[in-house]
Image (cartoon, rainbow, N blue to C red):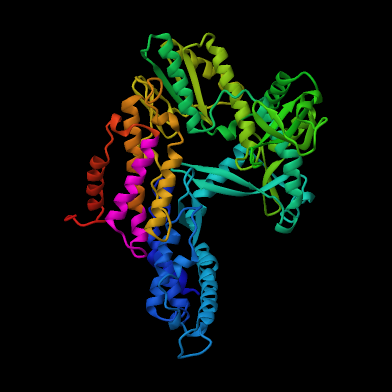
Amino acid sequence: MKEYPYIVDQICVNNNSDEKDNLSLSTEKSKVIEVIMTIIYKIIPVELFGTSKNRGLIMRSIPRLINTTVIAKISMEDVIRSVKLNQISWIKPRAQRTLSKPEFIRAKKLFCSFISWLFQVFICKITAAFFYVTQASQKNRLLFFRHHIWNRMTKKYLSKYVTNHLINLKDTQNSFSNYSDNKDFIGNLSLQPKKSGFRLIVKPFKGSWDKKVEYLTYQKRILRPVMQILQKVRIHNSCSSVTEIIDRIYSYKSQLLASYDGKIPTIYCYKFDAQNAYDSVPHDIVLRVLSERLNAFTNKDMIYLQSFNEISKSGLVRRRRNVVVDCLTDLSVLRNIDQHENEPYIINSKRIIDNHETFQFTKSEILSLADRQYKNTCFHTDSRSYYRKIGFYQGFPMSALLFNIVYDSLVADFYAGLGSHEETTIVRLMDDFLVLSTKKHHINKLKKVTSRCMKTYNLSINRLKTEFSTSEVSFAGLHICIKKLVCHKLLEDYNNSPIQTSTFQKLYKILIKFVQLRTKIASLFDLSIDKSERAGCKKNVLSLLKSILFKFCNSYRLLKTKSDFKISNFYHFLTKIFSFLTTKLPLNDIGVNLDRFWLYTLRILKHKRIIQNSV
């Protein structure tokens, strides 16, 4: 076994130790693939594959495995496609004879079991022996680091992080053996590298496989209802998705058009980012803000949550809903009074059925549970637990909600500091802020308000990500034209990574679903004057079409050896996309034409060497 580290060292030459970019310190995937193939060729005899050709067919799936994303899956049927089972002697019950149909089915299952072990166990353990495998922060792609490089990168970071943010204690009361025996909420530490620094995630321990019922019961009866109550009482002045950001900007645009006779005045934009936001929220302010929100909701001590289902006329459950109130009489509308048990209620033209689930909590119980979610959470290793001095652990179920409740309060303080703010809007997505205003002095005033809030919320502004503009700005995967208040999602804003599938027909179906999903952000494709307008709509449609085209090109190289590509089928696929888009908006009116885009498509396919220049 001593020769294998030497082999890996020869293939994977050490990265430049002076490189400051964390991501560039990872090993090239081509070298990782070469390491795995070299070790397989040396350890596993060719007889297990039958022939060298069979082994080559299996080995072509290794690059797919290494180049895949965290959430992608590889079908064993695809891996063994084209493999000649009759050439594999150890799965044949009778040598020198062709397999019968029952024997073939049995042999295929047996060989699939071997290939499953090879990919799911052997290759994974070989890879883990020589590389630390993780994913990049905010992306699903896998990164491979040599262990000594990873240890060098993370040792200094963790040492500084523990000193500044954590309390290191010897712990014999918590363990990963039984969830119910632990006095705290524990988890495993995971570091996701960024270009500079890391994102620290703690994956909560939910109990062993055979004892998860305890955690699931706690989640259903306590954690989830309390989170739903807190979700109800928060201020809700921020955004939780790109769709909400677009709607907020277009709502602001509509307000300005009404105030300025259908014209957009000069708008000033201020974008900033809270640095290390999760790690910097003071625990005392969390309790204060939660108490304020609960008291603002009701002056009573008890809060109730009622669960019910909204059903269709056919009887299918469409949505599960919850009602949060401070008095049981307010829930009477959902109770079966003088009605048959299975007869639904009609509320606002919707059919409602009571789930007979009513949860009740006092304010002190809610505050106590929330308090434990940041004071009694830790990552546990080697009989030691690391608790937080300040901030939240990303990964625990209530962390994001508590963070949003506190930062909702921060946005409310921003508005309060501005005083009159009719033509100013503040858009927040997690720790990213975008301020739009027709008054420049509001922007300057907000900068002063931000400085005052720094001490209260322990807020630190990332100066490198601060931007002031009157023309355009990039925010949360959007390009925003400030002069016209139009949102664009450009080609580079889409995820154009390849799709793992077995045939081109399946790929086309998946890509059509991508188009259907992406057009659900209706405001991007709305020609209205208070939405994307004609020019913005055209730009968004073309960006979407180009993203589908480039996603296909990136997927082509994974499919070209498994399925036949026909240009006529691809043209038919494009016509289906255009037919679907025509149902959403008038393509001809905005200047998007199938024939013109087809000429562009042919140029790209030729450039990518997918088709010949003669086509």
Rendering coords of residue 171 (x, y %)? 74, 49
Relative to 197, 317 lies left or right? right
In percent of width and height, residue 156 lies at: 53, 46
Instruction: Name which residue lies at 37% across and 32% down.
Output: 585
Residue 242 visible in image: yes
Q: Is 109 included in the stretch rendered in magenta?
A: no
Task: In this rendered view, identify the residue nearer to me: 97 or 547.
Answer: 97
Q: Residue at x 45, y 72 (%)?
A: 39
In the rendered image, residue 558 lying in the magenta stretch gets the answer yes
What main secondary structure does the magenta stretch of the protein show? helix
Q: Which residues are magenta?
A: 555-583
- Residue nearest the observer in this picture, 2 or 468: 468
User: Which quadrant holds the C terminus?
Assistant: bottom left
Residue drawn at (43%, 65%), measured in percent from left and top?
A: 62
Q: Residue furthest right?
A: 338
Tell me if residue 464 can be seen.
no
Measured as percent of width and height from the top left, residue 111 is found at: 51, 75
Q: Is residue 258 above or below residue 533?
A: above
Compared across the picture, whether 287 is left or right of 519 comes to: right
- Nearest the viewer among 440 and 220 is 220
Q: Is residue 265 left or right of residue 591?
A: right
Q: Can you name the residue that lies furthest to the left here?
A: 614
Provide residue 515's location: percent of width, then percent of height: 41, 42
Asked where in the image residue 276 lies, by quadrant, the reply is top right
In the rendered view, tell whether residue 306 sits above or below residue 513.
Answer: above
Count of number-bearing discs: 0
**Relative to residue 328, is residue 507 drawn left or right?**
left
Q: Nearer the viewer, residue 492 or 262?
A: 262
